[in-house]
């Protein structure tokens, strides 16, 4: 028997085990924000949303300029003669170069830590479970300070003087009067 009509949409949902792990990682927050170390740091309030966005943009720029940090089974961009996607490198390379230079000015440790989290998606010690973090509190604090410094430099380099607008309402919906 042949089924006729419109095909059903494929709706992929995580397995119950994956959903439970994401909910546990989110700790009452949005489980969708557990896909990367940057998302999880932002969800837990350890870095700001601007820093998270700057880290993502830096990783994207690096991927566009140098390719993926981790190999794929089939990466069409790496095949010889596969120039199907034309990119405007004239805009991407200077932006990445300015961001990388700004990050390098923060020092080798800050650059290494920021690239590890943003580009290679390595979890800093502060995101490890409490048992694994025990005895490494100073390392966790040091890594977080280096990461914040690196992300701050990236935010400044990539977003420049663009600042988020001041909120006009408080979380409870009451209006906020601008200070004169």
Image: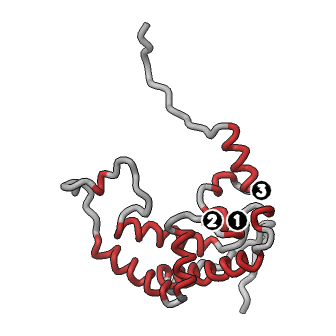
Looking at the rendered structure, which numbered label has been put on residue 51?
Answer: none
Residue 143 or residue 43, whichever sits in front: 143
Looking at the rendered structure, which numbered label has been put on residue 127?
Answer: 1
For this orientation, the residue located farthest to the front is 135
* Residue drawn at the location 48% of the way across and 84% of the way down: 157
The percent position of residue 20, horizontal first and vertical second, equals 73, 44
Dot placed on the residue nearer the N-terminal end, 3 or 2 = 3
Dot placed on the residue nearer the N-terminal end, 3 or 1 = 3
Residue 60 vertical position relative to residue 15 in the rendered view, above or below: below
Quick one: label 1, few (<14), some, or many (20+) residues within 10 Å? some
The percent position of residue 179, horizontal first and vertical second, equals 73, 89
Looking at the rendered structure, the secondary structure element under dot 2 is loop
Question: Distance of mark 3 from mark 2, alpha carbons?
Answer: 17 Å
Choose mark 3 or mark 2, whichever is in front: 2
- Give the residue at mark 2: 123
* Residue drawn at the location 62% of the way across and 40% of the way down: 14
Looking at the rendered structure, the secondary structure element under dot 3 is loop
- Give the residue at mark 3: 27
Picture quadrant where residue 164 is located? bottom right
For this orientation, the residue located farthest to the top is 1
Quick one: label 2, few (<14), some, or many (20+) residues within 10 Å? some
């Amino acid at each position: 028997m042949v089924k006729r009509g419109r095909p059903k949409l494929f709706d992929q949902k995580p397995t119950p085990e994956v959903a439970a792990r994401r909910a546990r990682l989110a700790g009452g927050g949005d489980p969708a924000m557990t896909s990367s170390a940057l998302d999880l740091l932002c969800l837990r309030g350890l870095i700001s949303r601007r820093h998270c966005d700057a880290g993502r943009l830096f990783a994207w720029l690096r991927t566009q300029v140098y390719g993926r940090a981790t190999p794929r089974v089939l990466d069409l961009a790496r095949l010889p003669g596969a120039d199907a996607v034309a990119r405007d490198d004239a805009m991407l390379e200077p932006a990445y170069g300015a961001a990388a230079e700004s990050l390098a000015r923060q020092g080798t440790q800050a650059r290494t830590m920021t690239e590890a989290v943003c580009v290679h998606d390595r979890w800093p010690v502060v995101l490890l479970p409490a048992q694994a973090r025990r005895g490494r509190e100073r390392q966790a604090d040091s890594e977080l300070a280096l990461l914040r410094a690196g992300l701050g430099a990236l935010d400044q380099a990539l977003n420049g003087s663009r600042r988020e607008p001041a909120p006009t309402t408080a979380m409870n919906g009451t209006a906020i009067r601008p200070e004169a």
